[in-house]
Amino acid sequence: LAPWVPVVGLEIHAQISSNSKLFSGSQVQFAAPPNSLVSFFDASLPGTLPVLNRRCVEAAVMTGLALNCSINKKSLFDRKHYFYADLPAGYQITQQRVPIAVNGSLSYSLCIDNKMNQMVTKTVRIKQIQLEQDSGKSLHDDTRSQTLVDLNRAGVGLMEVVMEPDMCCGEEAAAAVRELQLILQTLGSSQAVMAEGQLRVDANISVHHPGEPYGVRTEVKNISSMRFLAKAVDYEIQRQIEELENGGTILNETRAFDSKLGCTVPMRDKEGKQDYRFMPEPNLPPLILYDTKSLPANMNHQQVINIDWIHERLPDLPSVKREKLVEQYGILPEHSFTLLNEDGLAEFFENVVKQTQMKPKKVIGWILQDLLSYLKQHSLSVKESPVSSFLLADLLNLLEKKEISSTAAKQVLAELWKGEGKTPLEIVKERKLQQLQDQKELEQICQAVIDGQENEVIMVVLG
Amino acid sequence: QNVSLEVLDHLEHPALVDFRDLEGVEQLQKAIQFADQLHEVNTDGVEPIDSVLEDRWCLYLREDDVTEGNYTKELLENAREKVEEYFVAPPG
């Protein structure tokens, strides 16, 4: 049987972290009373016009730079037409002809065979990043045969990040999206929380035999978590392979991921190819960006966006942070991945290191094994940890000074989790966990044990 | 050139227009022919412009301040049907 090569591309929509919307002054906020965060423009009332939000442009430029893209100094806005209840204007303003950023790349890492100590780095090409409007929200009420529409989300700024089909499976797709999520959160351009709809992923999937042209692709939507992303992609790859091996064909269709059934199903409303009738947005001139060289002499600062200025102020990206952690503390690369993967864990680790004499290479074990596993067991975030970095450092100091043994330290930690406000030293004294250092005292105890177990001693001596 | 039935159907569907009868279709044909006159101009090597204002049409950048909202009552006044504070639309 000839092998199949799965091909996976992604279209990721990230909600821009801003106070107000892309083209209007209404607020961006999750979970507010329906239709309370809607301006007349968002509702598409006649006579309203789009006015571009500067912060949204900066967010897109930051993201483009972080993803090694070329920033287009001149980009254009277009209208994409389709009819849906949550799109009051009947079109979405997007950037179809010339988007704000193109031709970038994203590096991400994978564990081979789920072994943390064997990591491989992969790259996915970023085709483009474009600015566009989000739509409102539709709540389908099938019992009463109606759709309820809330326009609070209509007009919120989105960055659509298009990843080329360089990925081959669910694991790669999830890892790439995870790294993008970390980058966006580090930049602050998007909070990228999937659960709140701030990061939405659509996957384009096809399969073919090596050496043959690419197969027909399907688009999979409605993926609401990172875990489901991997599942949905892998399911669709399998479905396509089975279909083709049974002599069937793949339809160029849009499918939805059903998380309960763990499969993809054809989406209604998406029959036939859509004709979006793209046209230039007549109410918006081209978006012009500058760099230090092309900066116009006498223009109002507020009206000028300088790419170089933004570049200079980019924070350290996750990949750089990881390298620094490895270099500074001598920890393993896979440790740095785990540290950055949990919100606040890297800071916690560094705080403990600052407050203890124990070597970072030893501290990391306590962080990744003891602290992290406890937090995971109780579904707590690092911020919610009952054991602060101060307390843990205190405990590790006792261990480092050999005042307690490693086993005793674990017992103290178990006690500290209760969050009763006791210090490590207090617990040690309470439970009499101090390590005996006195040689004579230790000899006496050992002798007493041996004296009390004569039979066992004889058996040991006889071998 | 005639407008085929397939193209006609395709035009009507996404644009939600109805050419109704034969006369309507003839009107459409005439409109297309009229617009086709644009092709008489040779535009080889000429960059299309977005506006006759060219470079003088500057995109205004707004500060990221919340300046609008809380128009729920006014917006819902125009709605034929509403449920609590949601607009009501047909299913699908």
Image: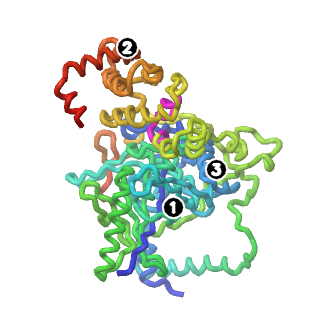
Check the residue under mark 3 and report the chain it is in: A
* Disc assigned to residue B6: none
Check the residue under mark 2 and report the chain it is in: A
Q: Quadrant of residue B60?
A: top right
* Quadrant placement of the N terminus of chain A: bottom left
Extreme residue toward the right, this view: A297
Give the residues drawn in magenta, as a range: A339-350
Whether the magenta-drawn stretch holds residue A153 is answered as no
When the figure is inspected, residue A348 is found, relative to residue A403, above or below; the finding is below
Extreme residue toward the left, this view: A455
Tell me which residue sits at (71%, 64%) in the image: B49
Please tell me whether the stretch drawn in magenta is mainly helix, strand or loop.
helix
* Disc assigned to residue A65: 3
For mark 1, what is the residue? A80
Q: Earlier in the sequence, mark 2 or mark 3?
A: 3
Residue type pointed to by label 3: Leu
**Mark 2, secondary structure of its residue:** helix
Residue type pointed to by label 2: Lys
